[in-house]
Amino acid sequence: MSAVGIIGRCVLERVALVGCPDYERGRVEEAVARAFELLGGPGAVVGRGESVFLKVNALMPYDPEKMVTTHPEVVRAVVLQLDGIAGSVTIGDSPGGPFTPSFLKRFYDRAGFARVAEETGADLGYDTGVMHLKVPDAGVMKVVPVCGAMVKADRLINLPKFKTHMFMNITGAVKNLFGAVPGMYKLSFHSRFHKDSDFANLLVDAALAADADLHIVDAVVGQDRNGPRAGDIKPMGVIAAGPDAFAVDSAMMAVIGKTPKANKPLAAAMSRGLTAGDLSDVELLGDSVEELAVHGFRMPDKKDIAEYVPEFIMQRFGSMMSLRPRPAEGRCTGCGKCAELCPAGAITVVGRLARVDLKKCLRCYCCHELCEFDAVELDRPLLLRLVRARG
Ligand code: SF4
Ligand code: SF4
């Protein structure tokens, strides 16, 4: 995360915004090439012969058309840009759950990353070694466990998919780097940092520890409302890139017409003085925010109410106004994966149906995010319905 432009006493982070209407191969290649060019070319990020790790978003083993994972055409276009410069390129992630090669293979195959590797000669990340890194100016975690392969590479390039997130509101450049934390560690962090602000600070710490050299956000088509897995598909038509995760996320919040504080990790970074959030410390390159403006982007249901309910009421009665996870009879297979992954131990499986103990539930929505059968419904409690009707 390095500052690159200085005007007067103000240090400016550069962010390239480039329109890209869809995932047609030629158009994605052109947009990614233009983003690199605006930032000085791939050689400005990667030295000749260096190893590069491309940290994708491989949240679930889903087809690219579900718009849950970084689109393979974006990954492919980035690999092509590095051709002839990088010594090696590895595509990888650590999704929630066991951090094992067989688990990873399912994700890489389904999301199209294996095909990109085959076509381009890139490697897939199966090294499950873990390193513990000190966080400079830590907020809540002084030492963070990270996937060794990501930080051992000479260069780490972060390739997030831009979506809403039930817990953090938005998953962009900062949130995607939580994927640098190996699978099962993530779950223990959910139970340890269950307050929004603490978890957001943890994400900032993880991003600082991973210290990616470049972030290229796939916001061509993402998700709004109740993402990051089961939201509504939202065409946005944008590739956003830059060396600073906070600046890139700030630019994307402007593009979707939302206040930067609505992105919880960005709000945490703002309160720690790591970014202004309002683009006053950003030099925008390429297409303008106005040209690329995304209209009608909807935030998660749960978070809409926080905009007009005072914070002290949210703190006291927040759980009564939060969506309630409920495995749906008929869709729930009783596979038990959610019970294994629930950081609060709030889920038990009875017969072929999972049940949630709402008194224990932290409202982290990991079960909703990670159920492969799309079986977890989010019910609106009466108080939430009343507040929304008045808002
Ligand atoms: S809710 Fe989903 S993950 Fe949980 S037991 Fe049912 S099918 Fe499995
Ligand atoms: S039941 Fe679901 S939302 Fe509640 S703590 Fe467990 S994983 Fe999180």
Image (cartoon, rainbow, N blue to C red):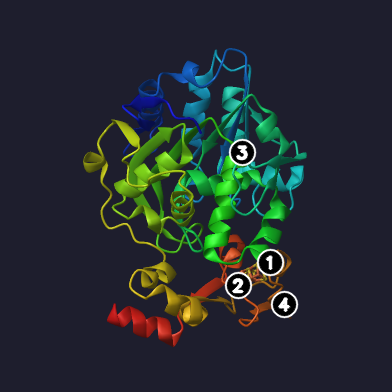
Q: Is residue 304 left or right of residue 101?
A: left
Q: Position of residue 292 (x, y in %)?
A: 26, 41
Rounded to the nearest angstrom, the CA distance separating label 1 from label 4 is: 15 Å
Rounded to the nearest angstrom, the CA distance separating label 3 from label 1 is: 23 Å
Query: Which tag, 4 or 2, sits closer to the chain's start?
Result: 4
Q: Tell me the crowding category of disc 4: few under 14, some 14 to 19, or many 20 or more residues within 10 angstroms, Cα based.
A: some
Residue type for callout 3: Ala
Q: Do the numbered discs 2 and 1 sit on residues whose CB atoms are within 8 Å?
A: yes
- According to the picture, the residue beneath numbered tag 3 turns out to be 210
284 relative to 386, above or below: above
Query: Which tag, 1 or 4, sits closer to the chain's start?
Result: 1
196 relative to 184, above or below: below
Q: Is mark 3 within 8 Å of ligand 2?
A: no
**Which element carries disc 4, helix, strand or loop?**
strand
Residue type for callout 1: Pro
Query: Which tag, 2 or 3, sits closer to the chain's start?
Result: 3
Query: Which tag, 3 or 4, sits closer to the chain's start?
Result: 3
Rounded to the nearest angstrom, the CA distance separating label 3 from label 4 is: 36 Å
- According to the picture, the residue beneath numbered tag 4 turns out to be 349
Residue type for callout 2: Leu
Q: Tell me the crowding category of disc 1: few under 14, some 14 to 19, or many 20 or more residues within 10 angstroms, Cα based.
A: many
Residue at 74 percent of width and 48 percent of height: 99
